[in-house]
Amino acid sequence: MRQWSLPELVRGCAEAGVRHVGLWRGPVQEYGAEAAGRLVREAGLGVSSLCRGGFLTAGDAAGRAAALTDNRAAVEEAAAVGTDTLVLVCGGLPPGERDLRGARERVADALAELAPHAAAHGVRLAVEPLHPMFAADRCVVSTLRQALDLVARFPADRVGVVVDTYHLWWDDTVAGQLARAGEGGRIAAFQLADWVTPLPEGVLTGRGQLGDGSVDLRWFRERVDAAGYAGAVEVEIFNPGLWAREGADVLAEVLHRYRTHVL
Amino acid sequence: MRQWSLPELVRGCAEAGVRHVGLWRGPVQEYGAEAAGRLVREAGLGVSSLCRGGFLTAGDAAGRAAALTDNRAAVEEAAAVGTDTLVLVCGGLPPGERDLRGARERVADALAELAPHAAAHGVRLAVEPLHPMFAADRCVVSTLRQALDLVARFPADRVGVVVDTYHLWWDDTVAGQLARAGEGGRIAAFQLADWVTPLPEGVLTGRGQLGDGSVDLRWFRERVDAAGYAGAVEVEIFNPGLWAREGADVLAEVLHRYRTHVL
């Protein structure tokens, strides 16, 4: 809902009967994290998650220190805005590097550094596996299995995973991994978007409205339910066509699609 | 080498010391499969593979029958042009469908129909797992593990897999699966391209010249060698920038990059 300011978003969601909003750091920082949290609470809503920390794969000491500083700030912003969940997009391969295994190990090292700080602020780190097409430039954690192997090094109440249908729908092992995530109490957030083609240049903003694409969204929702997840369901669709339309119309359409294709 | 006609390709490869060429059905059909095979042989070259059959996921009887007919013709073209390897791109989800599991099962059914015909012509079917970003529109087989599970239903000398670095590089389980493929004698072809970003619209033609991207090509080559693969190495780079250049220059550059980044 990039077309809406934070107050517009909160008012629009409250009027539409939506009870939780996922927020992004940029708008939260502009508005002030504490003020944003107050705004949401006073409208009777909750903040389901703050998006996003991460980018933890820098190979040099300076880059690594900068990332840790920024992620500590993100933890504090999450606490200030009133959510217990900080979504992490782990970062891609640094320019010129080809060592995916090394980059993945650096993510684990960074989580070990950040998890105690997050726990002290009542915030759980939520590692989001991103679609393999983002492995080079955004996230070296590409499957739910890989994310679960990674977070298994930490207590479940400190580090969990994000289940996003857009990133995981293609994976024929995902049903078993969703059950595993449930058994371990690892599902920290559940996000929905549909897969549509052709992908646009850069692929980031090619997500589809619920029901427009190839993803069996209800199948996912049922499995996430069965895994014991009882938190909010976030709809996260990066799509210029949706951003160009009137916010209330888009929100109403999303809710209609949700009832038709997800519930 | 889309800028070259078939005779130019054969002459250019022979002059550059390349001993095998992978061919595509379109140019082979235009030239005539038997004549194309003679052209290649008379230049002292071999045809490493014919690309491609597949698209076996149609849900309706007519679409299914048409696909089988086309794939039988592809088998015959492979035999006529003088290769023992027909690459299969299995096909995506039919429009409006969301049942990936069903589509994958239809691929297995089609392989069962085609494998005896291929064997009778001395042709091995080579199932190519494609990057998960193609799961909707090109290939529902997305990982090497999945491809190996699929082909395990058939004798190894009839149905193998294609290992393509572009499609598999992101997968943290690929080393084990390459070893498994070797043990089973399943590697029918080995193809190279590098991963570069940003991806172009439609993502198909965004492959990178060897050494320009994120893939540890040498790591792959060493593992494919260790898996016992002794066939040709194919370089397959869909890239309008390379197609726009003089063919001999591109081929010389590929050979230089091969020596630098792969050997």
Image (cartoon, coloured by chain):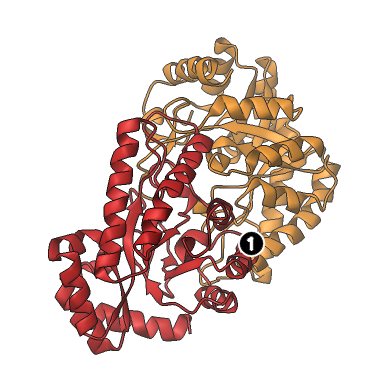
Chain colours: A orange, B red
Compared with residue A25, is residue B260 higher up or lower down, i.e. above or below? below
In the rendered image, residue B195, in percent from the top left (x then y), is placed at 45, 64
Viewer can see residue B204: no
In the rendered image, residue A132, in percent from the top left (x then y), is placed at 53, 52
What chain does mark 1 sit on? A
Q: Quadrant of the C terminus of chain A?
A: top right
> Which residue is drawn at the image coordinates 28% and 45% (left, top)?
B69
In the rendered image, residue A65, in percent from the top left (x then y), is placed at 70, 63
Task: Determine the image quadrant of residue B78.
Answer: bottom left
Position of A179 compared to B53: left or right?
right
Q: Mark 1 is on which residue type?
A: Thr
Observer-nearest residue: A49 or B150? B150
Viewer can see residue A38: yes
Observer-nearest residue: B19 or A243? B19
Position of B176 compared to B210: left or right?
right
Observer-nearest residue: B127 or B245? B127
In the rendered image, residue A146, in percent from the top left (x then y), is placed at 68, 52
> Which residue is drawn at the image coordinates 46% and 42% (left, top)?
B109
Task: Determine the image quadrant of residue A98.
Answer: bottom right
Compared with residue B212, is residue B139 higher up or lower down, i.e. above or below? above
The image shows a total of numbered marks equal to 1
Position of A250 compared to A153: left or right?
left
Q: Secondary structure at mark 1?
A: loop
Residue count near mark 1 (Cα–Cα under 10 Å), binned few <14, some 14–19, many ≥20: many
> Which residue is drawn at the image coordinates 47% and 54% (left, top)?
B131
Residue that label 1 marks: A57
> Which residue is drawn at the image coordinates 32% and 61% (left, top)?
B51
Compared with residue B28, is residue B262 higher up or lower down, i.e. above or below? below
